[in-house]
Image: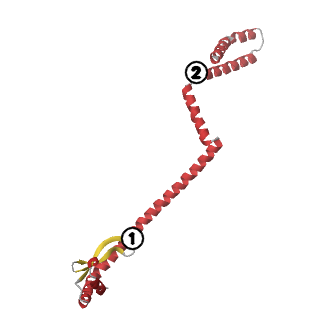
């Protein structure tokens, strides 16, 4: 291959350059300056050694990996276009990420605030429940007296747990002795109203 031919030529030239000290020594012996020649020969030797190292590096390259890498780069170019376009896209994605982090921060802040408000609402519900329990017995007695005047069965109000709302976390359930409100006769219901 052309690489092998080039490598052979460089090796031959380096072999010849190994004996150049004899030429410079002979020139100096007859009274001529060989500094310029020495400098040029050293520079030529350095250039040839550098090129030989590059060729050796090429031989060590794994062609499959290089082709695979080129394929990946081709895919990136296909997806993102030029480098400038890819940088622009990267900036856009970083900006989106920053916005998402801000949203995440706000969500966390609002979640904490919601938890604090929920705790405060539960405390208020407990206070309301305390007031209801405090006045329930007296209200039941007053209701019982009124029911006797209307010839109704003995009513009772009971507090039951309910989903939390603006009215608290309890509901009042009315019972007429052992009857549910839904099973009252129309006459009893009218008198109760």
Dot label at residue 25: none
- Decide if residue 13 is on the left or right side of residue 142: right
Residue 148: % across, % down = 23, 89
Q: State the SS at label 2.
A: helix
Residue 18 sits above or below residue 140 on the image: above
Residue 36 occupies which quadrant of the picture?
top right
Residue 119 sits above or below residue 182 on the image: above
Residue 177 occupies which quadrant of the picture?
bottom left
Question: Which residue reaches farthest bottom?
Answer: 149
The residue at which mark 2 appears reads as 59
Q: In the rendered view of the protein, which quadrant contains the N terminus?
A: top right
Residue 149: % across, % down = 25, 91
- Decide if residue 146 is on the left or right side of residue 111: left
Question: Which residue reaches farthest right?
Answer: 32
Pointers 1 and 2 in contact (C-beta within 8 Å): no
Is 146 in front, or is 133? 146
Instruction: Give the crowd class for mark 2: few <14, some 14-19, many >=20 residues within 10 Å.
Output: few
Residue 155 occupies which quadrant of the picture?
bottom left
The residue at which mark 1 appears reads as 120
Q: State the SS at label 1.
A: helix
Residue beneath the point at 60% across and 23% down: 58
- Decide if residue 126 is on the left or right side of residue 77: left
Q: Earlier in the sequence, mark 1 or mark 2?
A: 2
Residue 33: % across, % down = 77, 14
How far apart marks 1 and 2 lie (CA) works out to 75 Å
Instruction: Give the crowd class for mark 1: few <14, some 14-19, many >=20 residues within 10 Å.
Output: few
Is 36 in front, or is 78? 78
Is 55 in front, or is 81? 81
Residue 87 sits above or below residue 98 on the image: above
Q: In the rendered view of the protein, which quadrant contains the C terminus?
A: bottom left
Residue beneath the point at 58% across and 21% down: 59
Residue 44: % across, % down = 70, 19
């Amino acid at each position: 291959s052309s690489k092998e031919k080039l490598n052979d030529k460089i090796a031959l030239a380096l072999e010849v350059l190994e004996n150049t000290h004899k030429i410079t020594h002979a020139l100096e012996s007859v009274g001529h300056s060989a500094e310029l020649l020495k400098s040029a020969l050293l520079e030529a030797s350095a250039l040839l050694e550098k090129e030989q190292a590059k060729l050796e590096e090429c031989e060590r390259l794994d062609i499959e990996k290089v082709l695979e890498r080129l394929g990946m780069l081709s895919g990136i170019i296909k997806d993102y276009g030029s480098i400038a376009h890819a940088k622009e896209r990267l900036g856009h994605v970083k900006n989106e990420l920053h916005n998402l982090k801000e949203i995440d921060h706000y969500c966390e802040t609002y979640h904490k605030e919601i938890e604090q408000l929920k705790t405060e609402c539960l405390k208020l519900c407990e206070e309301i429940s305390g007031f209801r329990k405090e006045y329930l017995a007296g209200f039941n007695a007053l209701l019982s007296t009124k029911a006797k005047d209307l010839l109704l069965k003995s009513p009772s109000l009971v507090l039951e747990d309910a989903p939390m709302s603006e009215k608290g976390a309890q509901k009042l359930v009315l019972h007429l002795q052992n009857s549910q409100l839904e099973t009252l006769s129309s006459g009893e219901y009218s008198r109760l109203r």
